[in-house]
Amino acid sequence: MSHIRGRFSKPADKAVAQYTASLPFDYRLYPQDITGSIAHARMLAKQGIITDEEAAKIIDGLKSIQQEIEQGKFNFKTELEDIHMAIESRLIENIGEVGGKLHTARSRNDQVALDMRLFTKEAISDTINGIRGFQRALLDLAGANKDVVMPGYTHLQVAQPVLLAHHLLAYFEMLQRDVDRFNDCLKRVDVMPLGSGALAGVAYDMDREFLAKELGFSKVSQNSLDAVADRDFVLEYEAAASIGMMHLSRLAEEIVLWSSADFDFIELDEAYATGSSIMPQKKNPDVAELARGKTGRVYGSLMALLTTMKGLPLAYNRDMQEDKQGLFDTVDTLLSTLEVFEGMIRTLKIKSGNTARAVERGYTLATDLADYLVKKGEPFRTAHDIVGRLVSYAAEKGKSFAELSINEYKKFSTLFGEDVRKISVKSSLAARDVTGGTAPKQVEQALAKARKMVAKV
Ligand code: ARG
């Protein structure tokens, strides 16, 4: 048995082997593990710790194991515990004793830290690509519906008119911060831990800088204990992913609302909706609902790992093996959510007649009426009060602002004149001509700026 049982005279209990094994989930680190091992073998040869010939055999052996795995021919034996042991023991099986030299100047503790860092670096790059794709879909939808107005809400009560494009650009901004967060997290992931050994560093003349270069890292870790005990980088990815999912979940909630018969602002493409098994009329927004639901699991993984780490003494502890399923699940969930959201956004239809009618309901121009009085000299607080009373009068009469006569207006303030008729959704939008406001001119500029930020280079 090639499994490490050094001081032991009998194998682990079957249930214990199952219980402690990570192979059922960490098998997916095989590309990182093999990449790391190839670089390590090269470094060992360069430093004269093993011969060039030995390194060549090891590297060839590792490459054929990668092929075995990719062709589905590799036998994953759970009793080998984890992907690191599974690959190493297969290497020794295939190329003989020389395979046993690969683990010189290395421990599984720095090896797994390396694999996780390589994995997270790739995950960050995939995540940013996914976010970019989704951002482009948002911008295309905004650009194709530039003139569409909709009610803006606070407290989910109709508040003021906004451009739909402005609303969509709000999500663009959130996602832009998500990109920044992942890029920032990358700085701390981008650290090469090999050379830390089990915890104290290794007793060989290794070239850590060479390894960093081979493996595409910009720095090497500065403390061996920290390097094998640190999972901050996983936590940071999960924290950034949690915030990203929270953003997607808020949009999901809006899509659920907007596609309901009560709002009826959008029509989801059939490819992105599902039917009911009993109610033939139903077209359900399951994609959005599931994104909202999966967000809970992503938060859970962050909370689970924070809790796992909080009581661990330095350096490596086996508890840390629990970092993997949560990270893998988080990456898979975020990437798949971004992918389906991109398609959902690209295919949904905006019902601009309905969004425009919704602006007409609910006195969304009340703030503009107050601003009108302010321009004629009324302090804002008084103007607010006057318009408030006007709204309650109009509501009682069942009239919109447009349906009130000028005389009715004048009952509330003599400052009202014929020119109050000039207040419209259009004038309301145009008036919000500040950076970040919903004036068409501003939104046009914001859209152009956003497009530049996500342009494919
Ligand atoms: N499977 C382990 C993990 O994921 C690898 C490191 C094992 N190290 C050890 N000393 N048992 O954390």
Image (cartoon, grey):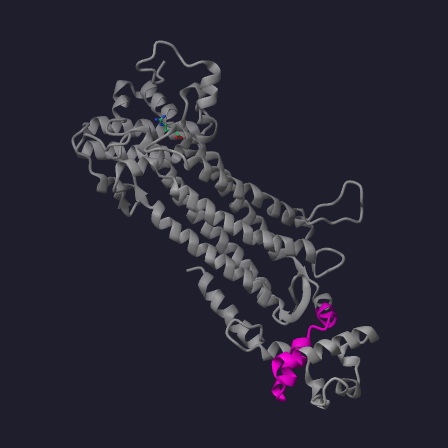
Q: In this view, does 426 lie to the left or right of 445?
A: right
- x and y, in percent, of residue 274 in the image: 70, 46
Q: Decide which of 50, 148 is in the foreground and name it.
A: 148
- x and y, in percent, of residue 140 in the image: 56, 63
Q: Which image quadrant: the N terminus?
A: top left
Q: Residue at x 64, y 47 (%)?
A: 287
- Report the magenta stretch's main SS: helix
Q: Report if residue 364 lies within the magenta region.
A: yes
Picture layout, residue 240 above or below residue 48? below
Q: In which quarter of the image is residue 143?
A: bottom right
- x and y, in percent, of residue 301 in the image: 50, 39
Q: Is residue 323 visible?
A: yes
Q: Report if residue 219 lies within the magenta region.
A: no
Q: Can residue 328 be seen in this view?
A: no
Q: Is residue 179 left or right of residue 88?
A: right
Q: In which quarter of the image is residue 21?
A: top left
Q: In which quarter of the image is residue 400?
A: bottom right
Picture layout, residue 435 above or below residue 102? below
The mark tally for this picture is: 0
Question: From this viewpoint, which residue is outermost toward the top?
Answer: 9
Q: Is residue 300 left or right of residue 263?
A: left
Q: Decide which of 234, 413 is in the foreground and name it.
A: 413
Q: Which image quadrant: the C terminus?
A: bottom left
Q: Residue at x 22, y 26 (%)?
A: 54
- x and y, in percent, of residue 280 in the image: 80, 46
Q: What are the residue bounds of the magenta stretch? A: 356-384
Ligand 1's image quarter is top left
Q: Residue at x 61, y 44 (%)?
A: 293
Q: In this view, does 304 lie to the left or right of 271?
A: left
Q: Decide which of 134, 292 is in the foreground and name it.
A: 292
